[in-house]
Amino acid sequence: MKKFVSVTVAAVMALSIGAPATAQNGKSAKTPANWSYEIKNGQRVPKANRVTNADGSWTEEIKQGNCTVTRTGRDGEVREVRTCG
């Protein structure tokens, strides 16, 4: 029984030593297109379709479940409209 435990512990240690080298190789993977969020700095960030106009105003849409949040802004003023259904 002791031999089985020591072999198991050795195998787990060997796998854990090699994991950090393969976890991050300096490149970040692209989030799949069908996901509603992106991973940035280890955090989940909702994807938004943002359009910026020549006059500095902008509009973005974010899907949250079955709702669509539309945010528009210009000169520091932000307006948010939530449409569900």
Image (cartoon, rainbow, N blue to C red):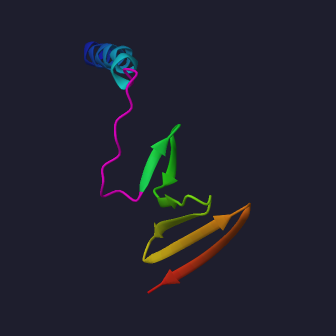
* Rendered position, 85 above or below 33: below
In which quadrant is the N terminus drawn? top left
Asked whether 32 falls inside the magenta stretch, the response is yes
* Rendered position, 4 above or below 77: above
Q: Nearer the viewer, residue 25 or 70?
A: 70
Q: Residue at x 53, y 37 (%)?
A: 41
How many numbered discs, if any? 0
Q: Nearer the viewer, residue 26 or 7?
A: 26
Measuring from the top left, give residue 74's x and y in whole percent: 68, 64
Measuring from the top left, give residue 7's x and y in whole percent: 27, 14
Q: Residue at x 30, y 49 (%)?
A: 32
- Chief secondary structure of the magenta portion: loop
Q: Which residues are magenta?
A: 24-36
In which quadrant is the C terminus drawn? bottom left
Q: Nearer the viewer, residue 1 or 6?
A: 6
Quadrant of res 4: top left
* Rendered position, 81 above or below 36: below
Q: Residue at x 49, y 59 (%)?
A: 50
Residue furthest front as drawn: 54
Residue furthest right as drawn: 76
- Left or right: 78 in relation to 18: right
Q: Residue at x 73, y 61 (%)?
A: 75
- Left or right: 66 in relation to 22: right
Measuring from the top left, give residue 64's x and y in whole percent: 48, 69
Q: Nearer the viewer, residue 82 or 55?
A: 55
* Rendered position, 82 above or below 7: below
Asked whether 43 falls inside the magenta stretch, the response is no
Measuring from the top left, give residue 70's x and y in whole percent: 54, 72
